Image (cartoon, coloured by chain):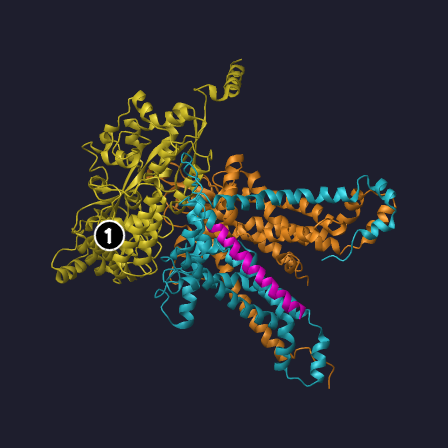
Amino acid sequence: MKNRLKYSVAAAALSFGAAGAAQADDLTLCWAAWDPANALIELSRDFEAQSGHKMSFEFVPWPNFADRMLNELNSGGKLCDLMIGDSQWIGGAAENGQYLKLNDFFAAEGISMDDFIPATVAGYSEWPKGTPNYWALPAFGDVVGWTYRKDWFARPELQAEFKEKYGRDLAPPASLDELKQIAEFFQGRDIDGKTVYGAAIYTERGSEGITMGVTNILYNYGFEYQNPEKPYDLAGFVNSAQAAEGLEFYKSLYDCCVPPGSSDWYMSENIDAYKSGQVAMQMNFAFIWPGVNADANVGGDRSGYFVNPPGPGGHFAQLGGQGISVVSNTDSPDAALAYIKWFAQEDVQKKWWSLGGYSALKSVVEDPGFATSQPYAQTFLDSMAIVKDFWADPSYASLLLSMQQRVHNYVIAGNGTAQEALDGLVEDWTEVFEDEGKL
Amino acid sequence: MSSYSITEPSKPQKWIAGSLVIAYALITLMPLLWIIATGFKSPADSIAYPPKVFFTPTLEGYVNLFTTRTRQTAEFLAANPPQTWYAEIVAKYDMVIAGPSRFGERFLNSVIIGFGSTFLSIFLGTLAAYAFSRFKVPLKDDLLFFILSTRMMPPIAVAIPIFLMFRQLGLSDTHLGMILLYTAVNLSLSVWLLKGFIDEIPQEYEEAALIDGYTRFQAFYKVVLPQAATGIASTAIFCLIFAWNEYAFAVLLTSGNAQTAPPFIPTIIGTAGQDWPAVAAGATLFLMPVMVFTILLRKHLLRGITFGAVRK
Amino acid sequence: MSRTSPDRVARATPGPVARRLTGLSDRAIAWIFVAPTIFLLLAINIFPLIWTLRLSFTNMRVNRPNEPVEWVGLRNYQRILNDSGIWETMQATAHFLFWTLALQILIGFTLAWLINRKFRGNDLWTTIIVLPMMLSPAVVGNFWTFLYQPQIGLFNYVVGFLSGADPSSFSMIADVRLAPWAIIIVDTWMWTPFVMLICLAGLRSIPESIYEAAECDRASKWRQFWTITVPMVLPFLMLAVLFRGIENFKMFDLVVQLTGGGPGNTTEVTSINLKREAFEKWRTGYSSAYAIILFVTVFGLASIYVKALNKVKSR
């Protein structure tokens, strides 16, 4: 009897389809294939148990992530109900109606953007920037920082040699110049019978790699995306003499201090090189730190973390990370919103952090115990305080591709000068904005 | 003077030619053997320097290929000892198997789309080839050239409207869409090849059948088709290999649902970086059927790859 | 092309009888048999091509459904032809085409000539040589990036072993001078067997009697090679060049996997560049014009070439 009842309820739910809000939906969440995504699977089991909805996941590796997911959005596909899309997509997705606007939902559910780290709200949720129009809930805070081999740095013989050469202790660098010195110091050195190299940096050409790397240096040499007084005024800001100097610095770092053949490296190649003991330092997004800390070869005390060092023109770090959005094409908007509501809860966010997900909720990161909860927690907080992001305009892909090409052409292929590369970039970007009718 | 043809190469000539060709064949084979070998290496062995020729084989690559894994704490692992041989392999890395990977699905998609489009292109191609071979079709030569020319188009050149069309018709990322698309691409090959095969079947057989009271359809079905069976089979394998290997359309038009193996295999990554043994394992499984077909097909090879333009 | 025709059948059976026997007229059957193929090809090849042409005169962007689509006349074409970046990609494509064809003809012909010495087991070894050609370029190309890695890659190790250079001293994919060759090597590895097979067919089509006659005239082997072998194989070789040329002009998967167009723009061949414009920047109108230009180029070059080929054949 009981069983029969259950069946008839199920049948009724099926026959009414989308009409019933309480029925169990299959939700697909799309994100990049990386460690945090696996943690999210773990976390989401609670949601499944509580709501009765079933979660599926579609994870795409980073080099193909933007390509595939933007293709999915633009082709009007129905694969994803929820999208943890990259921060730069927000402009396009908002203007073209690919994401649902969340303001009303936030208001109705009492979710306040003031409860999240400001940089993540600005970076992941707002479009147009600086206005209270929200298209995503900050889901995963991320920023470029550096990982280094604490155990190598601590070796007395290296300490002594370094001090003699540079007159200071071998310690995490306080400036970009110091960073380069340390990288030079380790380059080609023999450690435990293996040749090691200075640093693994981003050089990837196909998606966004080299841009996400070089901007860390450019910002700190004084590069600006545009005239702060006059939007889309590029000349003299993108290609200032200081910016060119910053680009030259990145090339000099590539020429002197990276593992041979690292001409097309992004997150995973850098992790590889670091974990296999090839490099003393690596530039990478903070998401890797939980994995490094747990690693059998380089984990625990053997690794340390530091904020992207300041340069002559300032102190910034490249923002990464994503917000979670509801794809407008979804057949189950209610269930998708229910997921976001669930995800925004403080308890869930706390658990998210404990599983290796960088929560952007203030009450989590401002908790007195947070900074000491993991060896990298303080570095994460310090880094998040100085972030800057790439363009998030609807034409971001064109802007990014030009930058990838111009920068790779100079830094890796060695064609032309830094000034020429940036002048070319101004040309390309101006053309894009002209096409957009913004200039 | 012993009896030898003046055009027949001498013994030493053969010997030299043989060794050169064998040397080239061995070089050519090296990357393929390396793929197969890497599939049986451990991740550490796969990136050893200098490259390892001798190693202890392991199935780690295959286990990683078919599963997704999550890292677990030592306590969890101690409390849940691995139950199966494959769980044991991943437990060495402080991980547990969280579920199957997408490889099985992608492989199955390749099979469905490959066989589906092959069946359709052979079915339509045989009909068209028979008509071109036996009947007076107006503008026959022009139509045949048109069919051939469709093959020259760069896939990317027609990809934009196909993308729009598929989006409109809801065919994006569906098996049906990919089957239709690959069928269209393969039709040129199947019509040209099959026409060649059917041309070679003497008309007399059908004439006899027609006089015996068969209809055209019956004659086609009961007389021509059995005669063309070998040709149809080898054409089918060529269509299958094309659909199996196709990449450009697959990467542009498929995603989570109908994605085939070629765009998927290069994106197999481990927890850190590309998991080369898993990639190699996937590549081995994916390439193996084609290698077997190639060896079976070697007599028909040339005809297939040149659209029947070269017949020997 | 077929010399046999259905006319004989028609002549053999009087018209009305034939019609009664078949149920349907031959003409109707012919159309029923041909129509689905033609329809599908029109729908998936010709219709899209015309659509591409139409789009090429607009400023459409697929990812901007809310923006009006306007006719821009020939502006897209003008911009492309004036864009120095596109000429660079054309050069990269030409460089790739030239060297792959040259190497594949040279090695392919030599191999075919050697195999034609008919040593024992030549069948088996021919099949082995042919294997790479049948495999998925995307999957194999991806694995080659592993073989090309400095230090741990097999390729660098073997080259280092043979030449004495340090395997970590060079990187096929990272170096601007070597990157084009990284692709040329893999393409040559994959496709030399194709040229070889066609040359082999050409060599085997030469009747022995011609050589016997030459032998009687006391022509040297060298002379025989240049006056008999080469001219007789030439039409076959040209056919191989046509097929490879068209295929390599479209080259996409191998380059995507190996270098992704880098370093810088060194190996940015046209189809990759086009893919970026169309499916990453989503400049639909612009990239449609680009696609049309490429299509006309291939078609034009191929037609000129086919004319030349026919001239050689009829000689």
- On the picture, is C193 further left or further right than C58? right
Left or right: B122 as drawn, with respect to C187: right
> Chain B in the picture: what colour?
orange
Chain A rendering hue: yellow
- Single out the residue that lies furthest toward the front: C73
Residue C292 is left or right of residue A355, and the answer is right
Q: Does the magenta stretch include residue B83?
A: no
Which chain is assigned cyan? C
Q: Residues within 10 Å of mark 1 (few under 14, many from 20)?
A: many
Residue lying at the far top of the rendered structure: A1
Q: Relative to residue A167, is residue B150 depicted above or below?
A: above
Residue C311 part of the magenta segment: yes
| Position of residue A177 in the picture relative to residue A274 (left or right) | left
The residue singled out by tag 1 in the image is A239
Amino acid type for the residue under numbered disc 1: Asn
Q: Percent from the top left, x then y, of residue A396?
A: 34, 43
Asked whether the viewer can see residue B16, the reply is yes
